[in-house]
Amino acid sequence: MKDAYERKEKLSLTSRIVIGMVAGIILGTIIRYVAGDNAWVSLYLTNGLFDVVGQIFITSLKMLVVPLVFVSLVVGTCSLSDPSKLGRLGGKAVGMYMITTAIAISFAIFSAVLVQPGSGIERSSEATFEANEAPSISEVIINLFPDNPINAMAEGNMLQIIVFALLFGISMALVGKPGERLKGFFDDLNAVIMKLVVILMAVAPYGVFALMAKLFTEIGVEMIGSLAKYFLLVLFVLIAHGLIVYPLFMRVLTRVKPGIFLKKMRDAQLFGFSTASSNATMPITLETVTRRLGVSNSVGSFTVPLGATINMDGTAIMQGVATVFIAQVYGLDLGIAEYLMVIMTATLASVGTAGVPGVGLIMLAMVLQQVGLPVEGIGLIIGVDRLLDMTRTAVNVTGDAMVSTVVARSEGDFDEEVYYDENAGKKLEEL
């Protein structure tokens, strides 16, 4: 008994999350094919227990996002001795995020043109999609500045919260002793919030189990069958981008071993996959970046929330493959000019894309409209988008951490000893 207990204690957080995820997938699949039509199972188990536990878990993570972003950004900003550093951080981070997004969608389009996932698929007359209107670039810029910061926090408007926190932190740094006294309060508050993140991570395996169990009672293998070529191609490009492009950036721009980066990112990737939300995963991403990868809080507290809002490499990959797929299904040819328009539109649109589940479809509608493709074609891929949304969120959070590390390295705010220390941030594993 004692040996079994000790083995249980030694299980890492990653192992426990994987066990919860696999168990949820297996149970959900069994329920779908054995008791999928049972009203009691649907009411009390699928839409009862699993849904309640899963939603409480995601809501608890989202509960931390606004206070975490605001407090950590204020702490990081007011600690900057050089105000011009903030402009450099912003320029480098936005530039890196847009470069990786452009690479992602270019890779996706090239792969789709090569593989032709839409060839041989008959268009369904039932395929429909109601496109929401996407904001213009001017609206995105204007909406960066909150007219009511409290309302921005209540609505979870990340860009407005980031701008207000930066201005508040800069003011604290410039005001003198009042700012110094206030900084102590924010430092303590930040420590309390990060402790709350650690506590929530302790129950993560149960939340992940419930989310996976409910999802796989609703999604069957047959749904993927008719779109297997499209599904597998998007999945391949996502994995290749995450395991090849990001490590290559790490190796070239930071001169560190990228394998360590991927190993330390596993918890955040699993959270991203389970929640399908960059915002919900942000507390774990920030914890990983600052405490396990060696990025200073002044950099990580800025680049991670910014990345969760504007870094949409995974979504860009879906948009690239889906655009080519829909064009092939409808028998429409796209030229070089149209492909370049897709790349430019998706890259710029990522700046105004919020990190919430399903938003990629809204942005895809805008991309399709730009090149004259029927928006209702999105209805063809909605069935498998949830599974792909989970994978691309894992890719997005990996990109957030990679850019944070690269920017920190360029600013001299990267601790290489922490990066190579396997025990750095190990308290996450000890829960």
Image (tube, rainbow, N blue to C red):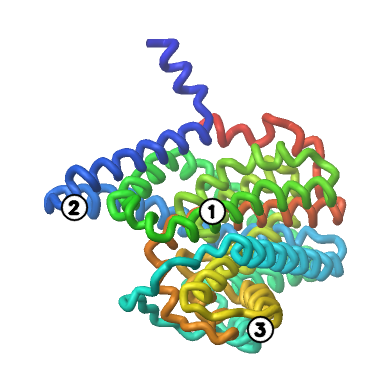
Crowding near the residue tagged with mark 1, few <14, some 14–19, many ≥20 C-alpha atoms within 10 Å:
some
Residue at position x 41%, y 57% in the image = 59
Question: In the displayed structure, does residue 233 sit left or right of residue 122?
Answer: right
Where's residue 380, x and y in %?
40, 70
Whether residue 85 is visible here, answered yes or no, is: yes
Name the residue beneath numbered marker 1: 235
Q: Secondary structure at mark 2?
A: helix
Where's residue 314, x and y in %?
59, 60
Name the residue beneath numbered marker 3: 141
Q: CA distance from mark 1 to mark 2?
A: 30 Å
Quarter occupied by the N terminus: top left
Q: 357 or 404: which is nearer to us?
A: 357
Placement of 386 over or under 204, stated as above or below = below
Residue at position x 66%, y 76% in the image = 339
Quadrant in which residue 392 is drawn: bottom right
Residue at position x 76%, y 37% in the image = 418
Closer to viewer: mark 1 or mark 2: 1
Amino acid type for the residue under numbered disc 1: Leu
First-in-chain label (3 vs 1) = 3
Disc ID at residue 42: 2
Quadrant in which residue 227 is drawn: bottom left
Quadrant in which residue 385 is drawn: bottom left
Question: In the displayed structure, does residue 309 sit left or right of residue 63?
Answer: right
Q: Secondary structure at mark 3?
A: helix
Q: CA distance from mark 3 to mark 2?
A: 45 Å
Amino acid type for the residue under numbered disc 3: Ile
Amino acid type for the residue under numbered disc 2: Ser
Q: 247 or 150: which is nearer to us?
A: 247
Whether residue 189 is visible here, answered yes or no, is: no
